[in-house]
Amino acid sequence: MKPALDYLFATMWGGWALYWWVASANVKTSVRRESVASRLSHVVPIGFAIALLLGWPALQHAGVAARSTLRADWVFWVAALLTAGGLLFAVCARVHLGRNWSATVTIKDRHELIADGPSRFVRHPIYTGLLVAILGTALARGDWRGMLALAIAALALWRKLTIEERWLGQQFGDAYAAYRGRVAALVPFIL
């Protein structure tokens, strides 16, 4: 990234993280929660991906920082828009889920199936938003480290998504099957 604008991405991600932390206090009580081992299976890879993405200094010269994209100004600004748009989409989805949201895979007390708002476009809009934001930040980085972070995050979120899909199917039965049949998981009309 350009040194003078590095703070733009750190500020966007930091603002998102602060909101996420504050909003996490107002959720319903969980009646079923994934195990610690299951949680670590997606949290650890995502943490590693974020470290790669935001420039973990120890990896600066580890052979993964070779240039992969052009350094044109327009690429940087498109990347910034993707990052901001992805983070805002994730926040919008989080707001729409309300007290049903959880950082871990859970079933809440009086859990509701949310199929409107951003969830009318994709079943897992928070993950879609985060992947778009990671893609934007990776493009701004302009190196293979960012693309590796995107791949790792996508795999980790896919793992978490498959657990959620199974649990939501068990909780909501035919209603979730119908929702799943008409709305894609991450990419509208595709995936």
Image: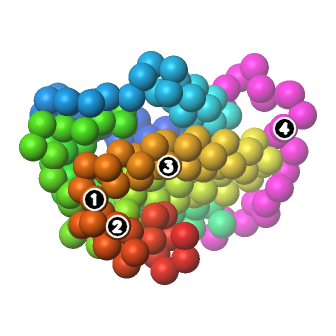
Residue 176 location, quadrant? bottom left
Mark 1–mark 2 Cα distance, whole angstroms, equals 6 Å
Horizontal relation, residue 120 to residue 84: left or right: left
Q: Earlier in the sequence, mark 3 or mark 2?
A: 3
- Disc number placed over residue 173 in the picture, else none: 1
* Residues under numbered marks 4 and 3 in contact, where contact means CB atoms less than 8 Å apart: no
Look at the image and give the residue range highlighted in magenta: 54-74
Q: Secondary structure at mark 2?
A: helix
Q: Nearer the viewer, mark 4 or mark 3?
A: 3
Q: Decide: few, some or many residues near mark 1? Use Cα within 10 Å; few <14, some 14-19, many ≥20.
A: few
- State whether residue 58 is above or below residue 138: above
Q: Nearer the viewer, mark 1 or mark 3?
A: 1
* Residues under numbered marks 3 and 2 in contact, where contact means CB atoms less than 8 Å apart: no
Q: Earlier in the sequence, mark 4 or mark 3?
A: 4
> Residue at left 66%, top 66%?
75
- Disc number placed over residue 162 in the picture, else none: 3
Q: Decide: few, some or many residues near mark 2? Use Cα within 10 Å; few <14, some 14-19, many ≥20.
A: some
Q: Nearer the viewer, mark 3 or mark 2?
A: 2
Q: Is residue 137 visible?
A: no
* Residues under numbered marks 1 and 4 in contact, where contact means CB atoms less than 8 Å apart: no
Q: Secondary structure at mark 4?
A: loop
Mark 4–mark 3 Cα distance, whole angstroms, equals 29 Å
Amino acid of disc 4: Val
Mark 3–mark 2 Cα distance, whole angstroms, equals 14 Å
- Disc number placed over residue 177 in the picture, else none: 2
Residue 42: x, y in percent?
54, 33
User: Residue tagged by mark 4?
Assistant: 64
Mark 1–mark 3 Cα distance, whole angstroms, equals 16 Å
* Residues under numbered marks 1 and 2 in contact, where contact means CB atoms less than 8 Å apart: yes
Residue 69: x, y in percent?
79, 60
Mark 1–mark 4 Cα distance, whole angstroms, equals 44 Å
